[in-house]
Amino acid sequence: MCGIAGELRFDGAPVNEAALRRMLAPLRRRGPDSCDVAVNGALGLAHARLAIIDLSAAGGQPMADAELGLTLVFNGVIYNYRELKAELSAHGCRFFSASDSEVILKAYHRWGGDCVRRLDGIFAFAVWDERARELFLARDRLGIKPLYYTRDARRFRFASNPQALLAAGGVDTALDPVALHRHLTLHAVVPAPRTLLKGVRKLAPAHTLRVRPDGGPHNGLSKRRYWSLAAQREPRDTGEAQWTERIRAELKRAIETRFRIADVPVGVLLSGGLDSSLLVALLAETGARDIRTYTIGFEHKGRERGDEFRYSDRVAAHFGTRHHRFRVSDRHLYDCLPGVIEQMAEPMPGQDCAAFYLLAERVARDIKVVQSGQGADEVFAGYFWYPRMDDERGSWLERFRRHYFDRAHDEYRRTVAQQLYMPDVTSPLVEAFLHEGGADTFMDAVLRMDVTRLIVDDPVKRVDNMTMAWSVEARVPFLDYRLVETAMRMPPELKLANGGKHILKKIAQDLLPAEIIHREKGYFPVPALKFVQGRFRQMMADTLASRACRERGLFRRDYIDRLLAGGGNQNLTPIRGNKLWHCALLEMWLQTHLAPPRRAVS
């Protein structure tokens, strides 16, 4: 895992190397092992390396192959790089490193842009083709690795996070009103290509982007979607037992691959919930030794527990892992929040952002790579709102909107200042996602949308940002694309049964203690950011009353006052997020990353 950045000039001027080096600074935490810049006329590439595969200097980047006329910067890991290397070698390719990075270079030379279809992994990369005078960028199928960009008449820039683009300068930082509506409606999700900032865009998952300095088609930028996910039944009639075995085999393969493909140790983030516990169980079944597990806990708030230690301890003891658990006080949590927000590529009010940040800080003292359970709830229908949607009548949009949207459109109009009023731009987008074809039922459409459109900008981005803040690579086997393709062909009732994740519970019944399988959903809870009180409430009140917030003119004051007067469940969204924290976090992110505010829109 690494941080990547680059600049391609359209105006014939040389690359601004000073700006390129400024872009490296916000990427160094993603790649502290080495960093370098390569400049060649109109093109400049930058790379901050976290060495995981081929730890030698031969695996460094930017990686150039002068014979082929190609230069690469790459963030991620290619799990099938050894198989691809063997295939390419059979075609006469010669390799100078043992890295997966070089395999991408040679694959691009052999298959062009179609090379992405052959890559099994998580990736964001850019290849400069000197002979074709073209920059080729790609992002993995499910968007595990991020890729942001900005362009104007003079240049195109890209990076692993917006902070790097902002550091280079020249970015339009006015708020995008369409993105703001979606951010405040879809639990802080802004689907690609938009971000909250008008001048910053992101490449969608499963897409490639070609950029030509001479303009070319589509004003110099040409996008292509190379993979899509169907959620439809198979012609053959497959029963529950067969589905259980198929999913078990796919999941075990995904876990073993993510453990084996590394030249450094790989651990597991163990919350004590079903998903992370199943990772440990199946990893142990593969014969893996010296499994390292890590968990974190916070202070309780009333009946809301701040840790899952009683479960994670049981799993660690059951499998004899080398277990590490950490408890965090409210004071330490409070003190770390500015650092958490600084590392957010976009505002993310998910309460466990701080948990992953603080846990990754401790993990980084021991190892560089972990596996995590993100994606299991979306792929296998584990959240409480799925059966509620499924049981209701009405249009697909109505059924989804009622149980997922943080705010109805009327409440949105009461939330933001008048200059940001606009029609409901989120509902039509969600309706289009639900009805884009390739889904047999409403629940098929919901889960497919969640997996391909929503989680990339919520739990997936959250885990990437917070682990990479401490130079830790997070691998997510439940989002292995082949596992996901198989799971999406499964009838939804096999997921929704038994309180959700029925198939995973079937797999676990011979592997885990019953109390782990049938407990309430487990995660890394942070009660202080859900039931806001004390110093946390005061911090949020101070932020929303600050001069910067008032000058930005984003929120209506009467709405903020109602949130401050409320408390407990009164401020919770349908999926249990805290509205006060959401608003305060958005303002804190803007204050952290942008210059002193102008008015909300330009």
Image: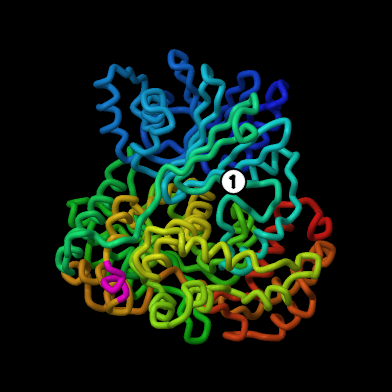
What main secondary structure does the magenta stretch of the protein show? Answer: helix
Q: In the image, is residue 163 part of the stretch drawn in magenta?
A: no
Q: Position of residue 169 (x, y in %)?
A: 74, 39
Residue beneath label 1, please? 161
Q: Position of residue 399 (x, y in %)?
A: 48, 77
Q: Position of residue 389 (x, y in %)?
A: 43, 78
Residue type at tag 1: Asn
The quadrant in which residue 91 appears is top left
Residue drawn at (52%, 46%) of the image: 146
Residue drawn at (83%, 67%) of the image: 550
For the record, the magenta segment spans 491-496
Q: Image quadrant for the N terminus?
A: top left
Q: Image quadrant for the C terminus?
A: bottom right
Q: Residue furthest top?
A: 67
Q: Nearer the viewer, residue 592 or 289?
A: 592
Q: In this view, does 280 lie to the left or right of 67?
A: left
Q: Position of residue 294 (x, y in %)?
A: 38, 60
In the picture shown, does residue 489 fall above or below 40? below
Residue drawn at (70%, 41%) of the image: 167
Q: Nearer the viewer, residue 329 or 209?
A: 209
Q: Is residue 578 left or right of residue 62?
A: right
Q: In the image, is residue 494 part of the stretch drawn in magenta?
A: yes
